[in-house]
């Protein structure tokens, strides 16, 4: 699925690719961070690494490679080895599931422009996110002179100043959160995001029905590969289904090749 750039600058975060399958969870989580200014570069690099340097194990690699090979091969189904496992025609039930997925997918695509527009309005109207201030020089000086026995003394000047700083930030953060919810409603983003998320779930369920439908021929696998090129299945989930299909096809192939009893 194509990535959609999210304008997160209003939240003090860099733009980064968003996968609609994830329902903007990471983006919404990041918006609530209260990272200090000195950690901005660390936050930015961690966001980039989370998307660009994801762990890929052997199982995920096999699944992705296998689906890519099935989807890109133009001759994989031209010369079936055995009709029992390499039928030239897919299962009609699987084709029906493919059609249902494509219908849900088209609905999702149709909603994207309106959702993106609402998201832009939301970020444009969003107030600046408050940043928790660092301890003042006075706080640091008072802390340097504290004895261990005074750490829990709420009346100590350092603890009084520190508590006041945290309390004021908490108040600003609460005001920001309230304003953010109001902006979500005023811009129509809350309503549109709920509807878009529901449609993503519907499309995801339809895609999973295709993925986990038992494949009994290479032509059936080709149907799943077509959906994978559009939906980009989760590698772990795809591996689970693909390995089950391969085991089933292998079992059917052995049965077909076994000599028949006289």
Image (spheres, grey):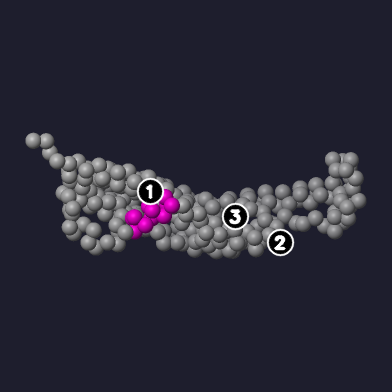
Q: Which residue has dot 2 on it?
A: 38
Residue drawn at x 34%, y 46% is 243
Q: What stretch is highlighted in magenta?
A: 58-68
Residue drawn at x 30%, y 47% is 246
Q: Where is residue 232 in the image (x, y as percent from the top left)?
A: 38, 55
Check if residue 39 falls in the magenta segment. Answer: no
Q: In which quarter of the image is the N terminus?
A: bottom left
In the rendered image, is residue 57 in sight?
Answer: yes
Q: Please identify, in this view, whether the residue under mark 2 or under mark 1 is nearer the observer.
A: 1
Residue drawn at x 42%, y 50% is 59
> In the rendered structure, are the residues bearing label 3 and label 1 in contact, judged by CB atoms less than 8 Å apart?
no
Q: Which of marks 2 and 1 is nearer the N terminus?
A: 2
- Residue 31: numbered disc: 3
Gap between marks 3 and 1, in whole Å? 33 Å
Q: Quadrant of the C terminus?
A: top left
Check if residue 63 falls in the magenta segment. Answer: yes
Q: Which of marks 3 and 2 is nearer the N terminus?
A: 3
Q: Which residue has dot 1 on it?
A: 239
């Amino acid at each position: 699925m194509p990535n959609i750039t999210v304008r997160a600058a209003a939240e003090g975060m860099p733009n980064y690719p968003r996968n609609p399958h994830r329902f903007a969870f990471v983006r919404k989580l990041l918006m609530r961070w209260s990272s200090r200014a000195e950690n901005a570069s660390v936050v930015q690099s961690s966001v980039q690494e989370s998307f660009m340097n994801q762990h890929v194990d052997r199982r995920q690699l096999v699944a992705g490679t296998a689906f890519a090979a099935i989807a890109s091969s133009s001759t994989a189904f031209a010369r079936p080895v055995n009709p029992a496992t390499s039928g030239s025609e897919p299962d009609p039930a699987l084709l029906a599931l493919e059609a249902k997925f494509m219908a849900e997918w088209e609905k999702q695509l149709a909603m994207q422009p309106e959702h993106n527009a609402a998201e832009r309005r939301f970020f444009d109207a969003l107030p600046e996110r408050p940043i928790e201030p660092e301890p003042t020089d006075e706080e640091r000086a008072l802390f340097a002179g504290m004895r261990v026995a005074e750490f829990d003394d709420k009346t100590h000047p350092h603890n009084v100043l520190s508590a006041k700083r945290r309390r004021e930030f908490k108040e600003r953060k609460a005001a920001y959160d309230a304003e953010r919810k109001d902006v979500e409603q005023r811009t129509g983003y809350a309503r549109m995001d709920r509807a878009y998320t529901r449609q993503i779930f519907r499309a995801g369920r339809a895609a999973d029905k295709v993925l986990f439908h038992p494949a009994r021929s290479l032509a059936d696998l080709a149907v799943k590969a077509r959906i994978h090129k559009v939906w980009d299945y989760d590698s772990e989930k795809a591996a689970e289904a693909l390995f089950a299909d391969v085991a089933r096809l292998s079992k059917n192939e052995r049965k077909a090749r076994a000599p028949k009893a006289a």
